[in-house]
Structures are given as structure tokens and as C-alpha cells.
Amino acid sequence: MIHLSGVNKYFGNNHVLKDINLHVKPAEKVVVIGPSGSGKSTMIRCINQLEKPDSGEVTVDGINLMKSKAQLKKIRQEAAMVFQQFNLYPHKTVLENLTIAPILVQGKNRDEAEQSGLDFLTRVGLKDKASAYPSQLSGGQQQRVAIARALNMHPKIMLFDEPTSALDPEMIKEVLDVMVGLAHSGITMVCVTHEMGFAREVADHVIFMADGQILETGTPSAFFDNPQNERAQQFLSKIL
Ligand code: ADP
Ligand code: MG
């Protein structure tokens, strides 16, 4: 579903992705962890073309992103992203937040977009907030709306970039619970997070990044219980 082969990315002289190879099969869940500044966000952003690599190949669902600029719109719909900051439209209701892109970008009719939007709001436990505005919701609720909004594009891939990092501790679980449910639905997921419980529960592979490189890949138990790479050992000793 996702292939990054020999991907390099520079910001000026800063070589932030160094020969990255990442292969994710349909329905696989991959958790990416590593120190701040290691290139995790940049890598995940290359998957939906929020960043363009300087060299290498990126293929998503059979579409070669390095060759076909015209595919941008299609890729953004296939690979929906949830960020640390929820970025909801403040002057739109919750349900409007969910229906704007399906109507304007995907050409869905309003009834269809609202019906599926309400289904996804139900799934994240927020159907009763359909008419509320984002400012009336807690951070955890806003992030659940952001997840429902991404799902209402009916993506094949969900990308998460530290979705719980901006939340108060008591709200983290409600968001992770939604993500665990989603993981069990069979969607392909790449998730940057330091939530080890989540990684252990859902990840097929954990990927450890540092200094723009993937230094270790393993199952959650192999990685957390017996990391091989020295940088990974140091990192885990600080966060576990
Ligand atoms: P992580 O998500 O692991 O914290 P990032 O991918 O955000 O790491 O950043 C990797 C490196 O790239 C850092 O040195 C960061 O400062 C730099 N970087 C990220 N985005 C940009 C940008 N838009 N312009 C310039 N430098 C950037
Ligand atoms: Mg980041």
C-alpha cells in the first residue's frame, strides 16, 4: 500500500531523511517512534505529499508520487492525516467540519456526506455534538472530531502525527480508544506516537528513527523488550 524507497529529503543543508525505506502492506499498522527532530513528521508527510522528497521513490496504492503531480488530489483523499493540532474550522459546526471536503473535493451530495458524517461521529462517540462548534468541545473531543473528519473522506490509509501529544493526560485514552477501534477495522495505518500501550496493542511493526534514518524495525515485543540498536535502547530507557 505504501512504498518509500531510497527517500532523501533536505531542508537547505539539513539532510533530514537519509535513504529511507518503508514498506507497508494493506491493513498493516506501523508505529513510528524516535527522538524529536529525527524526521518522523517529514517521513509521514511524504506519504501524502505534504512534503516532496528530493530523491527516491514514493508509491501509494500503486501510484508513483514522484512521477504524477496530477495525482495529488487523489492521494490526499486516499491517505488522510490527523495532526497534533486538530485544525478544525472554528466557524463551522462539527458536522460541517466533516462534510466540507467530501462535498467540495469529492463531489458528494450533502445528504450522503451528512449521513456518513453522522455515522463516523457515532463511531467516535460524538453524535450529540454534531451541531456544536469546535470551541465548545474539549481537546480530546476535538481530536475525535478530527479523526471522524478524516474518516469521512473514506481513506484507505490513515496517517497520525502525534495525535495525543497536545492533549491533557485525562483525554489521551478517549482518543487512543478510537484509534484502537479504527486499527481493528482493517484500515492501513501509520502512526507517529510515543504511546507504548497503543503500539503494543495494535502495531504490526514498530519503526525507530533517529537522525533521519530508520535504525530499527521490529514487532512491538521484540522492539520494546529487546531493542538491538544502541540509540533505541537509550531512547527507550528515557521514556519507559
Ligand atoms: P520529528 O517529527 O521527528 O520531530 P521533523 O520531521 O519535524 O522531526 O524534523 C526533522 C528535521 O527537519 C528537524 O531538524 C527540523 O528542524 C527540520 N524541519 C522540519 N520541517 C522543516 C521545514 N518545513 N523547514 C525547515 N526545516 C524543517
Ligand atoms: Mg514531528
Image (cartoon, rainbow, N blue to C red):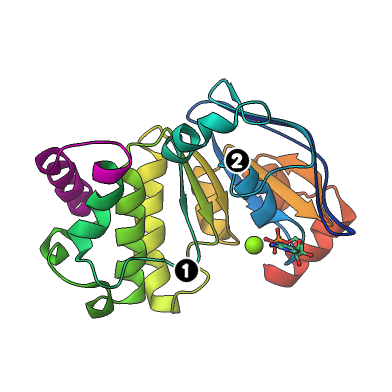
Q: Which of 217 and 40 is in front in this view?
A: 40
Q: Residue 104: image x %, image y %?
A: 28, 45
Quick check: 220 left or right of 235?
A: left
Toward which corner of the image does residue 193 lie, by quadrant?
A: bottom right
Q: What stretch is highlighted in magenta?
A: 103-123
Q: Looking at the image, can residue 125 be seen?
A: no
Q: What residue type is labelled 2?
A: Ile
Quadrant that contains the C terminus: bottom right
* Residue bearing mark 1: 85
Q: Residue at x 19, y 66 (%)?
A: 93
Q: Which of marks 1 and 2 is nearer the N terminus?
A: 2
Instruction: Tell me which corner region of the image, top left, top right, bottom left or bottom right, holds residue 124.
Output: bottom left
Taking the spot 68% from the left edge, 53% from the top edge, the residue there is 42
Q: Is the residue 81 above or below the residue 139 in the image?
A: above
- Residue at image mark 2: 47
Query: Residue placed at 62% from the left, 31% from the top?
Result: 65
Q: Hey, which quadrant is residue 24 in on the image?
A: top right
Determine the residue positioned at 18% across, 42% down.
113
